[in-house]
Image: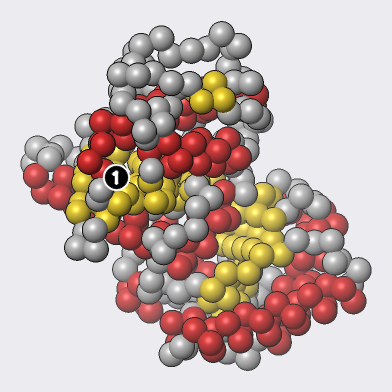
Amino acid sequence: ARTFPFVPFSQTPTAISTMASPGFNEFGQEDNLRYGSPFPSYEVGDHSAAPLINQDGSKPQILLMGLQKSGKSSIQKVVFQKMSPNETLHLESTPKIIKNDISNSSFVQFQIWDFPGQIDFCDNSIDTELIFGGCGALVFVVDSQEEYSDAIERLTQTIAKAHSANSNISFEVFIHKVDGFTDDESRTEVQRSIKKQVQDELIDANLSNAHVSYHLTSIYDHSIFEAFSKVIQKLIPQLPTLERLLNILVSNSKLEKAFLIDVVSKIYVATDGSVVDMQYELASDMIDVVIDISCIYGMPEDQEGLAYDDKSQSIIKLNNGLVLYLREVNKYLALVALIKQENFNKHGVIDYNFNIFRKSVADVFSKKI
């Protein structure tokens, strides 16, 4: 069994303890790997963190599809180009296929193809192998504020064509513009209705083996970022390892919840398995607070770029007895955790375990897994 020297919360950082963690063979680390000193000897901020890249060197492809005026371009502008949601009201319809490289000094790097709503994939002149062959995920946007029978028909046709060309595609349905509903019950009912209709159509087309996920989204809140986070996670081969590392960190440091977040896009790459009331929204807002304050007080006036480096960290005490804790993991990623205030009193243990976690994450991405 591979061992990682996280310190259990009942001990102090000076008493080094190793915790057995079976199933970590995918790290690709040598059998004799041990951290010989209480704090690993590596240069903070200088370790490698390979962005999301396929093994052949290409970036994963995400196809963004849906009927006209469903909100595809608005989603892309808000999530990846930081456009204000109100500004998207003036966007024109997409007239042709637009390919964008999402590589803004971020861990989350891929190609996103925005397809105009009028493209009919049943047209035999369209080369479906070319479009879907290298696709990792297909995001289909359904406008929940309009009659969606035509959208469901187009969705099932698209799934049939894409699945025949590439059975490994992850199909993601964004039930969009749910901010138009006044209560959660209405949103849930729309999701249930769309899901049932799509499943019935797929069964009739003998495509019951096509895996389809559903997300309620709006550009006016954090739901669109959370939905894209779940899409991106399916394209990260190291996800199971990252989740297990977070589970170990949470367990040994008495954390309530932890997110590993891409700082630029605010997409969370991984989270632990605990179920608590902490929402992703709180972690995302903390990223905004840290970056905004760092831009004002932490950067010279003549310097450009992201106000985030190896010294970035923040502690915010909430009025409900909880503490928000942010630490830099590498130049792309930050750890945001929620901790009970009485457990944060042993912050030396937490800091020590975080250093082990950060080194382990660096090791994960320095290997081709």
Could you tell me which residue is drawn at 52 percent across and 62 percent down?
227
How many numbered marks appear? 1
- The kind of residue on which mark 1 rests is Asn
Q: Position of residue 196 (x, y in %)?
A: 74, 80
User: In the rendered view, would you say 80 is above or below 353?
Assistant: below
User: In the rendered view, would you say 189 is above or below 124?
Assistant: below
- Location of the N terminus (image quadrant): top right
Q: Position of residue 339 (x, y in %)?
A: 32, 49
Of the pair 64 and 239, the residue shown nearer to us = 239
Could you tell me which residue is drawn at 25 percent across and 48 percent down?
342
Could you tell me which residue is drawn at 19 percent across and 54 percent down?
317
- Location of the C terminus (image quadrant): top right
Q: Position of residue 221 (x, y in %)?
A: 38, 71
Which residue is most to the front?
A: 10
* Image quarter of residue 146: bottom right
Label 1 Cα neighbours within 10 Å, binned few <14 / some 14-19 / many ≥20: some
Q: Position of residue 328 (x, y in %)?
A: 31, 36
Could you tell me which residue is drawn at 33 percent across and 60 percent down?
282
* Image quarter of residue 149: bottom right
Left or right, residue 179 beside residue 155: left
Of the pair 134 and 325, the residue shown nearer to us = 325
Left or right, residue 10 beside residue 186: left
Confirm whether residue 57 shows in the render.
yes
Confirm whether residue 329 shows in the render.
no
Figure coloring: secondary structure
For label 1, the SS is loop
User: In the rendered view, would you say 41 is above or below 364?
Assistant: above
Residue position for label 1: 343
